[in-house]
Image: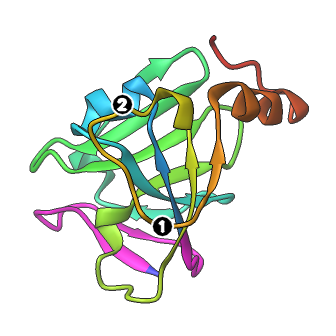
């Protein structure tokens, strides 16, 4: 699947993935003014236009990237892994997506809710999964 930022300077290509998730953590909501709607990839995407990107170390174990030309959020990446969580808006041309899961559901504010039936994980449930993979997230 292929996607691009608003101005088109950054293009991203990755394997076809037909599901997406929402993250309700406070950092994602501050980063994008709402939950991060994203495609979760377990391999590094092919990125063109990296000269238009800024990568920000958002924690000791992750970084976030955006296009510094148009401001489009591009991805969240767990350091030391091939895990990339890519902004759903990059891939608007893919009509066959299924809303699969929501993470940090216990951090979701009361002022919005999705009607979709999804798998929901709390912060602790997600961090337990990270720890199983040897990743020590910040609490």
Q: Which residue is drawn at 26% across and 37% down?
A: 111
Instruction: Residue 8: say if magenta.
Output: yes
Tell me where residue 112 appears, x and y as whole percent: 30, 44
* Secondary structure at numbered mark 1: loop
| Quadrant housing residue 115 | bottom left
Which residues make up the magenta segment? 2-19
Instruction: Classify 103 as above or below 1.
Output: above
* Dominant SS type (magenta): loop
Viewer-proximal residue among 113 and 38: 113
Which residue is identified by label 1?
116
Quarter occupied by the C terminus = top right
Neighbourhood count class around disc 1 (C-alpha, 10 Å): few under 14, some 14–19, many 20 upward: few
Colour theme: rainbow
Residue on which disc 2 sits: 109
Q: Which of marks 2 and 1 is nearer the N terminus?
A: 2
Q: Which secondary structure lies at badge 2?
A: loop
In the image: residue 127, left or right of residue 106: right
């Amino acid at each position: 699947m292929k996607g691009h930022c608003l101005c088109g300077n950054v293009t991203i290509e990755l394997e076809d993935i037909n599901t997406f998730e929402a993250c309700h953590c406070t950092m994602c909501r501050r980063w994008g003014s709402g939950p991060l709607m994203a495609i979760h990839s377990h391999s590094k995407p092919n990125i063109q236009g990296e000269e238009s990107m800024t990568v920000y170390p958002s924690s000791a174990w992750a970084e976030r990237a955006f296009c510094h030309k148009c401001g489009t959020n591009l991805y969240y990446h767990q350091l030391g892994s091939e895990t990339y969580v890519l902004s759903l808006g990059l891939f608007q041309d893919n009509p066959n997506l299924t809303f699969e899961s929501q993470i940090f559901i216990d951090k979701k504010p009361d002022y919005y809710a999705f009607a979709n039936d999804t798998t929901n994980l709390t912060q602790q449930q997600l961090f337990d999964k990270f720890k199983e993979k040897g990743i020590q997230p910040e609490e």
